[in-house]
Amino acid sequence: MTQIQRKKTSSKADSFTESVIREMTRIALQHGAINLSQGFPDFPCPLELKQAAYAAIAEDVNQYAITWGDRPFREAIATKVRWYLGLEVDPERQITVTCGSTEAMAATMLATVDAGDEVIIFEPYYENYGPDAILANATPRYVKLHPPEWTFDELELRQAFNAHTKAIIINTPHNPLGKVFTRDELSVIADLCQQWDVLAFTDEIYEHILYDGAKHVALATLPGMDDRTVTINGLSKTYSVTGWRVGYILASPTLTGAIRKVHDFLTVGAPAPLQRAGVAAMQLPPQYYDDLARLYEQKRKLILQTLDAVGIPYFVPQGAYYVWADISHFGYPTDVDFTYHLIKEIGVAVVPGSSFFSDPQKGRSFIRFCFSKKPETLAAAQERLFKLLIADS
Ligand code: GLN
């Protein structure tokens, strides 16, 4: 017998770590901490979705849906995005239903990007985009969002585009910052995409969670962008069903053709009965979205009051359900040390800022709070966070 020793794991898998966001949820559970880390609601989803899901199971909708999505769901998506985004999409040729927007982004990259292509990512960024790029053999190219307003520098963005650029990822409303990209910012991006013949992948999962009159603009609706934008979304955040894993992709017929093939071989399809419930979600009246935004306005108020009372500076989110907070004055060596202190001693779990940067050093003075929680959860977290004041004095 030869003694060949082979590395058991792939270089790709070796090149990224497990998701810090998901890890924090596990550690929170271990320590009985209130979980303000991973972004998911701790309150029920709308009754209409539950009833449609029960009915689908009762009717034995148990087998595969069409790989790229059950037709009634795709039609309902097309109607809803026409109303909300002002986007015309053909449900037969331009919509792919996926296992959450996580699969949507991965399938999109795998379907469009070749080895050596560069993908521009604004930093800080939702941690999945890094491994997505690695899995697709792409080279991520990070462009900084600068405090205090967390805008990009137009010159820096311009310099990031080059002959190797294949795509740019835009996440608006933004996780972790809560920034909502303005039409002017998106126009700059749109012009560069057209100048360099670059695709745009937009993660718009927080499109309905907006504050202080902020407006969500879909990049695909800007002139010249419909054929080069891949719009990614899902049921998770808008309808409070993050565990259902139902997402969708809107793209040109050409891009959709490639994306559907990758999606088919990755997952075959999203859960069939839950796609039936997706129809009910898409048919909720406009009032639902107003109420959702108002509900989150209340939650944002509670968490910001807490941070004010405890003396933690933050960026006021205009969208999404996170607060990006500055912990530098606590004097901990790293954001991770501070996060562990919060989880173990204070009893509140958050996400360390470094997990949103390619170079962890850049995120050392930040943490992210998630506030998609019941008022009583936020009140209990407040009570615990007050311990920081006592420890400080
Ligand atoms: N988007 C959520 C977050 O940032 C969680 C996503 C996930 O864990 N799949 O916390």
Image (cartoon, grey):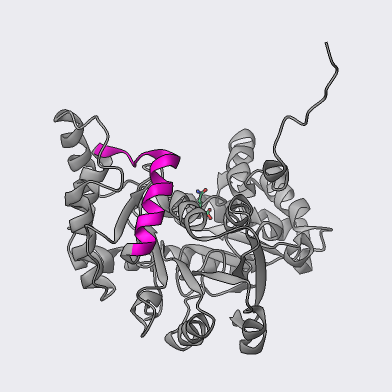
Q: Nearer the viewer, residue 79 or 309?
A: 79
Does 360 sit left or right of 206 as displayed?
A: right
Q: Residue lying at the far front in this picture: please name it.
A: 2
The picture places residue 1, in percent across and down from the top left corner, at: 83, 10
Boundaries of the magenta span: 254-272
Whether 49 is drawn above or below 294: the answer is above
The picture places residue 375, in percent across and down from the top left corner, at: 42, 55
Query: Which residue sits at x=21%, y=72%?
Result: 83
Q: Residue lying at the far top in this picture: please name it.
A: 1
Question: Does the segment drawn in magenta span residue 137?
Answer: no
The picture places residue 3, in percent across and down from the top left corner, at: 85, 18
Label count reads 0
Query: Which residue sits at x=74%, y=49%?
Result: 341
Question: Does the segment drawn in magenta span residue 258?
Answer: yes
Does 241 sit left or right of 127 as displayed?
A: left
Name which quarter of the figure residue 222 lies in: bottom left
Does 61 sit left or right of 207 as displayed?
A: left
| Residue 354 seen in the figure | yes
Q: Main secondary structure of the magenta part?
A: helix
Name which quarter of the figure residue 94 lies in: bottom left
Question: Could you tell me which quadrant the C terminus lies in?
Answer: bottom right
Whether 79 is drawn above or below 381: the answer is below
The picture places residue 137, in percent across and down from the top left corner, at: 63, 54
Query: Which residue sits at x=34%, y=41%?
Result: 269
Query: Which residue sits at x=35%, y=56%?
Result: 257
Does 297 sit left or right of 188 as displayed?
A: left
| Residue 237 seen in the figure | no
